[in-house]
Image: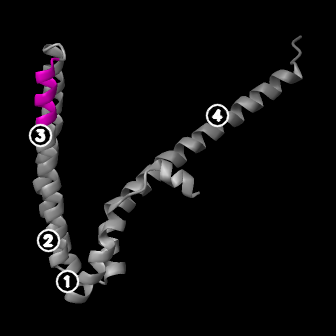
Amino acid sequence: MRTENPSNKIFIIVIGLLLIANIVTLGLLITDKKTNYDDHKNSMRNYLKTEIGFSDAQIIAFDSVKSHHRAVVKPMFDEMRTRKQLNLKNIGAQNFSDSSIINAAEYAATQQKNLEMKMLNHLKEIRNLCTAKQRAVFDTGFYKMMTRPNSETQRREK
């Protein structure tokens, strides 16, 4: 005959509860990341509609400007990613020589400058969609919307 030890049952129950808690936590983390992505993805659109007071026609124009901007910068990001991998391989192949590091840094700086110029001109295009009254609000508040708090800032604010 087999007798079961009551402490084994307790361990099995505790392990089951921990497993369920981990599954629930994982689900919440995945859901939260999706929500944060969706919030960020539409943050400018929401800002323009609620804070600046964009009309439906202005929102449609914004969507067009945004789509064009994404089409322009996506290849830039792809190129930067590819080139960064090549530069890192090159640095390693050249035994981390000063010249290989300088060349990689100069290229990255040039690409970053080009990307910043595209982004700032994109903001200018968005600003040009504003009426005179809306521009005053946009000019004094867009940067607040553009600066996303990092996780450390969010922790301190809670």
- Check whether the beta carbons of the residues at disc 3 and disc 2 lie within 8 A of each other: no
Task: Using the numbered discs, state the Cα–Cα distance from disc 3 to disc 2 in whole angstroms.
Answer: 24 Å
Element carrying mark 1: helix
Q: Amino acid at mark 2?
A: Glu
Q: How many badges with numbers are in the image?
A: 4
Q: Amino acid at mark 1?
A: Ala
Task: Using the numbered discs, state the Cα–Cα distance from disc 4 to disc 1 in whole angstroms.
Answer: 51 Å
Question: Does residue 71 sit above or below 2 in this rendering?
Answer: below
Q: Position of residue 152 (x, y in %)?
A: 49, 48
Going by the image, does 72 lie left or right of 150? left
Q: Does 47 appear in magenta?
A: no
Mark 2: give few (<14), some (14-19) or many (20+) Cα within 10 Å. Answer: some
Q: Is residue 54 visible?
A: no
Mark 3: give few (<14), some (14-19) or many (20+) Cα within 10 Å. Answer: few
**First in sequence: mark 2 or mark 1?**
1
Going by the image, does 30 lie left or right of 67? right
Q: Amino acid at mark 3?
A: Glu
Report the disc number at residue 79. 3
Q: Give the foreground label among 4 and 3.
A: 3
Which residue shows up at 35% across the image and 66% down it?
A: 145
Task: Using the numbered discs, state the Cα–Cα distance from disc 4 to disc 3 in whole angstroms.
Answer: 43 Å
What residue is pinned by disc 1?
57
Q: Where are the magenta residues, as a range?
A: 97-106
What residue is pinned by disc 4?
19
**First in sequence: mark 2 or mark 4?**
4
**First in sequence: mark 1 or mark 3?**
1
